[in-house]
Image (cartoon, rainbow, N blue to C red):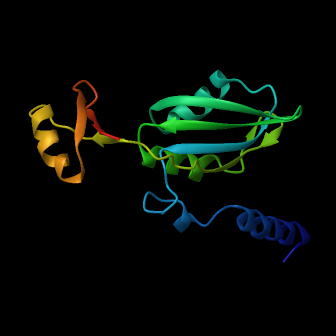
Amino acid sequence: MNQTMLLIKMYMYSYCDFRPYEAEMDEFNPKATRTLFIGNLEKDVTGLELRKTFEQFGEIIDIDIKKQGVSSSYAFCQYADISSVVKAMRMMDGEQLGNNRMKLGYGKSMPTNCVWVDGVADTVTEKYLNLQFHQFGSISNVTIDRERGHALVYFEQ
């Protein structure tokens, strides 16, 4: 084995140790959310830069950039579904954005009185969803986005 091959193998092992295990990055991870944490960003990163970098993995709902002191930033990118977060983590964790190597993870989930429902067929009505979800508590409102096939079910506090 020549010296170059040895260096490549050493780099591969140390790089693989840095990246999370593939099994930890899936939709069934207990920490999985629709929000992607993006750490170690340059201080002047923009929402447009992040959107261009991460929109290839799925529909982005919102990007929230937080400044951390004077030298760096971090952000939260909320996707329409968890699988987009998983794809982004698998492809972009440890990759460069500007001069910095990004650190990606699941964003923390926040308690809410709203349930997001995907794959809603054209024949599904607000009344039907109300009947299906009423067993989990009193419902204050049901909204269906027919164009995207999504629904929001709001529970009373």
For residue 5, which quarter of the picture?
A: bottom right
Q: Residue at x 15, y 32 (%)?
A: 126
Judge from the rendering whether residue 93 lies leftward or rightward of residue 147; answer left or right: right
Q: Residue at x 63, y 21 (%)?
A: 48
For residue 157, which quarter of the picture?
A: top left
The percent coordinates of residue 74 (x first, y second) are: 72, 38
95 relative to 73, above or below: below
Judge from the rendering whether residue 21 lies leftward or rightward of residue 139; answer left or right: right
**Which image quarter is the N terminus in?**
bottom right
The percent coordinates of residue 57 (x first, y second) are: 50, 39
Q: For the view shown, which residue lies furthest in the bottom direction?
A: 1
Q: For the view shown, which residue lies furthest in the front direction?
A: 157
Judge from the rendering whether residue 42 lies leftward or rightward of residue 51; answer left or right: right
111 relative to 122, above or below: below
The percent coordinates of residue 112 (x first, y second) are: 42, 43
Q: Residue at x 49, y 31 (%)?
A: 60
For residue 59, which quarter of the picture?
A: top left
Task: Please state which of residues 117 and 8 is positioned toward the viewer in this rendering.
Answer: 117
Task: Please state which of residues 96 and 143 is positioned toward the viewer in this rendering.
Answer: 143
Q: Residue at x 67, y 42 (%)?
A: 38
66 relative to 108, above or below: above
